[in-house]
Amino acid sequence: MDWLEEKSEQFGKFLQEKSLARALVWYLCVGMLGVGAMYWITRNVCLAWIEVLVKRQQEASCAEAFRLLQTGGFGKVRSWEGMLLWALGGFYYYCLYLYVFACFCIVGKIFLDTKIKQPLAAIKTGIAYINMGDYSHDIVWGSQDEMGVLCREMEQMRAGLLKGKKDQWRQQEEQRKINAAFAHDIRTPLTVIRGYTEFLQRYVPKGKVTQEMLLEKLTAMHQQEERLLQFSNTMVTIQKMEKWELSGEWLQLQELVGQMETVLNGIRQNTDKEITLHTSISGQELFLDKNLLMEVFENLLGNALRYGEGQVQVKAVLAGREFTIFVKDDGPGFSEKALQLGAETYFSEEENSQEHFGIGLSICRMLCEIHGGRLALQNSISRGAIAAATLSVGLRRK
């Protein structure tokens, strides 16, 4: 029995690698072998019994028994032995058709259960879970036939839906954090403006506000208005990043580096910090979204200039199909918390801080992910912070 079970299991695995049509042919071949074996056994058993009964009835040979069967000679026999002989003769002639019919029924049932119903049940169960909002139930079927291909395609669809759902959840969570942080950030400027407005409304009519005091209050109110405008622009920028559509083009690497150098030259005119650009790659063409790359570059540069003390270093590196921009400053570097969460939207070091230096970095992270890349943060061994933006690019050499 163990040998039979082992062979049956091996045959089942063999059929899993076959298409539905070939598997059905194999099932029919095995079934017909069974039919042949059963027919051979039935034939010999029937002939043996017929010969015994004929000898008892008429002392005839087996050949005579056939003649009597064909001519209806046994019709005159009324005993139970004669009836049994008549039944054996009929079964002998018609058992082949019966076995073939039974073979088709059994093979069809086995084929339908193992090759059709079971994978369809797996698909049905997976779809039921998806309809209930549960995307974690795998749709797995191990065969290599058409039903296996269908199950794998359904599994890919389920995985895609799960990824899309996770992205949606992540975006909703990020939006919730943005809204909460934005509401917190605008509260302070509005409170300051309201306080100054009430002060001026109360004391200006009484002539108790000097020209210098009035100018001071108006200047402070203008600064708070600038902060509100900055917060509003940040929200618009973040929403624009979420809807960014890639527009790739082939660019000479020298042209790309030249555009980065142009941006640096403009910044050098307005800062006393030393900014350098290093690259050792040439002779390649890259397929990427230039506008997205420059947006990432300018945000990384702005963050480094904000926290650097005197020097900012930029380095462009091409490794395989990944183009990376390293921006290093000589500032205090990232804290342990910032290394883990610095690229999260509206991240701040302190709970009640009004400074959210993660805005530029979060924009870079979102853009890098859109371009199939990533943003990495680390501290320099000597001093300062390093931000590395990696984009997945197409590549061809001249």
Image: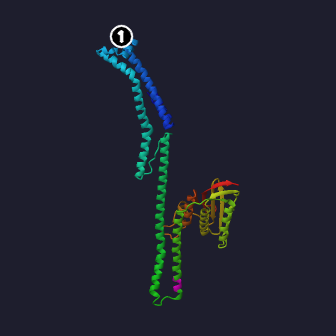
Residue 98 place in picture, x, y as percent: 39, 26
Q: Amino acid at mark 1?
A: Lys
Q: In the image, what residue occupies the spot 47% across and 53% down?
A: 161
Indicate the quadrant where residue 123 lies: top left
Work out which quarter of the rendered image holds the N terminus and state it.
top left
Left or right: residue 380 compared with residue 51? right
**Which one is in front, 325 or 291?**
291
Magenta stretch containing residue 39, yes or no? no
**Which one is in front, 109 or 198?**
109
- The residue beneath circle 1 is 55
Q: Circle 1 sits in a helix, a strand or a loop, which is it?
A: helix
Residue 389 place in picture, x, y as percent: 60, 60
Eyeballing the image, is 47 above or below 98?
above
Q: In the image, what residue occupies the spot 50% across and 37% down?
A: 19
**Residue positioned most to the front:** 71
Left or right: residue 340 compared with residue 254? left
Indicate the quadrant where residue 371 lies: bottom right
Looking at the rendering, the stretch of residues picked out in magenta corresponds to 213-217
Q: In the image, what residue occupies the spot 42% across and 31% down?
A: 104
**Which one is in front, 197 or 335?**
197
Magenta stretch containing residue 214, yes or no? yes
